[in-house]
Image: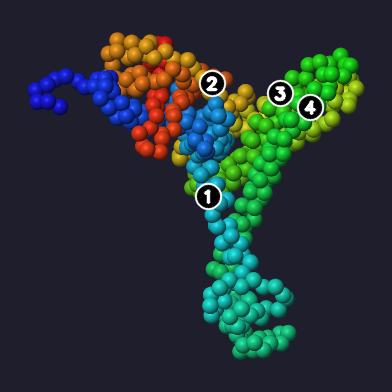
Amino acid sequence: MAPKCNAICDEAVIRKLVIARRPDLAERFERFLLESYIEDNDTVKWCPSIPHCGNAIRVKGDIYCEVECTCGCQFCFNCSLQAHSPCSCMMWELWIKKCRDESETVNWITVNTKPCPKCHKPVEKNGGCNLVACICGQAFCWLCGGATGRDHTWSSISGHSCGRFTDDQTKKTEQARRDLYRYMHYHNRYKAHTDSLKQEAKLKNDIQGKISISENKESKIKDYSWVINGLNRLFRSRRVLSYSYPFAFYMFGDEIFKDEMTPGERELKQNLFEDQQQQLEFNVERLSGFLEKDFQNFTDDEVIDTMKHVINLSNVVDRLCKQMYQCIENDLLYPLRTPHNIAPYKSKGLDRASELDISWDSAEQSSQSTKRSQDEHRSQHASTILGKRGLELHGSSSDNRVRPHKRDRPDANGGGALFDLNVPAEVVDKI
């Protein structure tokens, strides 16, 4: 900052100057440097786990992917919400908002109640007579909502008659009823498969017990890895099937793609998608049924027969999931004018992070010996503050590798413990 001084005071210089006199400020500087690096880098995000695990994950390649942190949290890297493929991020955000807020309660009130003409509170009809009374004492006609007297006969209400057709109100009520029924159709199936996934998650301990019993009994069959493989396939396919219903709700509705397809195109694509969805659902239920069997009590022939069914259905379900994603990406989303990206389907599951050993000295030397642009220079020195260990994700493809790195939680005094910085790809590749 001195006049006519051309020296560059980068992060390394600041660190050396400050750490001798004020180590607490040096630690805060390192923490803020880490925070700013992650906030300015689209390929690095904190794990959204609650409570926060302290991991930051860097993805190399497409940011539209789903990852699993070492803490076990699975999330969408693009929006940091729970993994929701094949829904796009916009679809999932709209869906969870629709499920949480009172929009469907309002629809139900519109369909099943009418406002009192005096106090305007919603009134639900609980009898057969079209003369209803609000709790405020006002009587009104259920057919038209007009205020009336309380006297009535089987054919008329005192001081009132209504026989005129009001088209607008009827259309609004019918549209609200159709929207409500449509939402209930997709929500009920989404919830049913989500509940099934939660119940099937409890199968893992039961199946481990069954495998232990089977391995200890006198039998020619000692390898039961097909059971675990089938169970993992069931989890992944059930999850895909569950999120396919929110996807269909918005894909073939009017909230996002109203002007993107003609009614004929919408019907054709919906039939194509629902046929694949139905095939996947049928085979997922069959796979679930075979995995729930008490194979520890079976004879060897019965175990072999069950094994064949589980292996075959696992392959069928995997193939159907791939076909559904191909249909979504190529036939449904690709022709749209509005871009919608989804995380790709992976047969082996989400990319998982693992620890990566990094040398402080080698990272320091690498960052000091290489000339880069200003942005790269900043990333290099961020890597020199890295601690002795980081995290690296090993996925099924090299295009979507993820590297999370650990940070400590700041203390209550605001000084904060030393934060480990995320390693840029250029430095990691050299180490």
Q: Is residue 128 left or right of residue 324?
A: right
Identify which amino acid the numbered label 2 is placed on. Ser
Identify which amino acid the numbered label 4 is placed on. Gly
Cα–Cα gap, marks 4 and 2: 28 Å
Q: Are marks 3 and 1 in contact (CB under 8 Å)?
A: no
Instruction: Classify residue 132 by image quadrant.
Output: bottom right
Rendered location of residue 237, percent (x, y): 67, 32
Of the residues under marks 2 and 1, which one precedes in the sequence? 1
Asked if one can make out residue 335 in the rendered structure from this viewpoint, the answer is: no
Disc 1 crowd, CA 10 A, few/some/many (<14, 14-19, 20+): few
Q: Is residue 81 left or right of residue 387?
A: right
* Residue pointed to by mark 1: 97
Element under disc 4: helix
Q: Are marks 2 and 1 in contact (CB under 8 Å)?
A: no
Cα–Cα gap, marks 3 and 1: 35 Å
* Residue pointed to by mark 2: 354
Identify which amino acid the numbered label 3 is placed on. Asn
* Residue pointed to by mark 4: 209
Rendered location of residue 38, percent (x, y): 38, 30
Asked if one can make out residue 345 in the rendered structure from this viewpoint, the answer is: yes
Identify which amino acid the numbered label 1 is placed on. Lys
